[in-house]
Image (cartoon, helix red, strand yellow):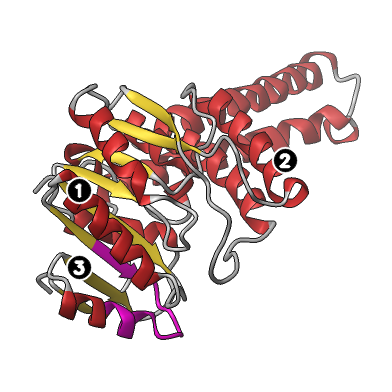
Amino acid sequence: MDISVIVPLFNEDESLPELAAWIERVMRENNFTYEVIMVDDGSNDDSWAVIENLRASNEHIRGIKFQRNYGKSAALNEGFKAATGDVVITMDADMQDSPDEIPGLRKMIVEDGFDMVSGWKKKRFDNKLTKNLPSKLFNKAASSSSGIKLHDFNCGLKSYRKKVVKSIEVYGEMHRYIPVLAKWAGFRKIGEKVVEHRPRKYGVTKFGWSRFVNGFLDLASIMFMGKFGKKPMHIFGLWGSIVLLIGLFIWIYLFIGKIFFAQFNMTDRPLFYVGIISIVIGTQLFLAGFLGEMIARNSSDRNFYLVERKIGLDL
């Protein structure tokens, strides 16, 4: 199969028929073999009924329905597991991503040799104050921290080599940082393509200001996990040992002064309490690294969500 298109969605029953028809037209014009995997993230409208109707008239449509809303990362991760195409393309269901970009995104993977290509909505139709400015700040911080030169980490329109999506795990709110996850998995050829951003035609945005706060927290988390996720002792153990030694040296200094000079009461000096705090914090950091090592070596799957139904796919 040439292409798997993954469409995560939540309450998008109005846009799905038009989106499916548009994708089908693009695939037919380019003679691609394809599948469209629509992942219903616990919608409470008629989205699943629409997917069932689309499947009845188009065998290329597949559907996955979550029992409740788990978030975009869970939807993408489940779609990645189900995808069988040589090239995997993700897009949002709100019609702001254009399926006409699919051939160009596939070409950059198949012919230009990229492992992953991220869309860049250079010209946006969002509110400049509430979306564009925070998005630019967020993308600048993400690019500087990760070393990946992209302008739009959060763009839902992306293409991947199949091996990439089978090698990464998207969990929590990490869908914003799939390029970083791909880089940490060893895929270095990550490109960018300017794509069309269309005005919203149906529904309302599902994201608010909180996503930018969460985005920066997730950035710190993923940078830490990328460097120390499999070796937490290297960071906690190192700093725990340093702080613990500082506390011990303080106590030794105070003990020598008390025994040989007897000029002061140890508990009357602020340095005594600095030593105690250093020893306690150093011990806690060291134990945190030790426990982190045990958890990292014995952790089970971090994704837990219940799939209620599937169509066109094996349960």
Q: Is residue 142 above or below residue 209?
A: above
Residue drawn where x is 72% and y is 40% of the image: 133
Give the residue type at disc 2: Leu
Which residue of the protein is positioned furthest toward the top in this rendering?
260
Residue 112, quarter of the rendered image:
top left
Q: Nearer the viewer, residue 214 or 152?
A: 152
In the rendered image, is residue 302 in sight?
Answer: no
In the rendered image, is residue 19 in sight?
Answer: yes
Viewer-side label of 1, 3: 1
Please provide the residue range marked out in magenta: 37-51
Label 3 sits on residue:
61
Q: Quadrant of the C terminus?
A: bottom left
Viewer-side label of 2, 3: 3
Label 1 sits on residue:
29
| Element carrying mark 2 | helix
Q: Are marks 2 and 1 in contact (CB under 8 Å)?
A: no
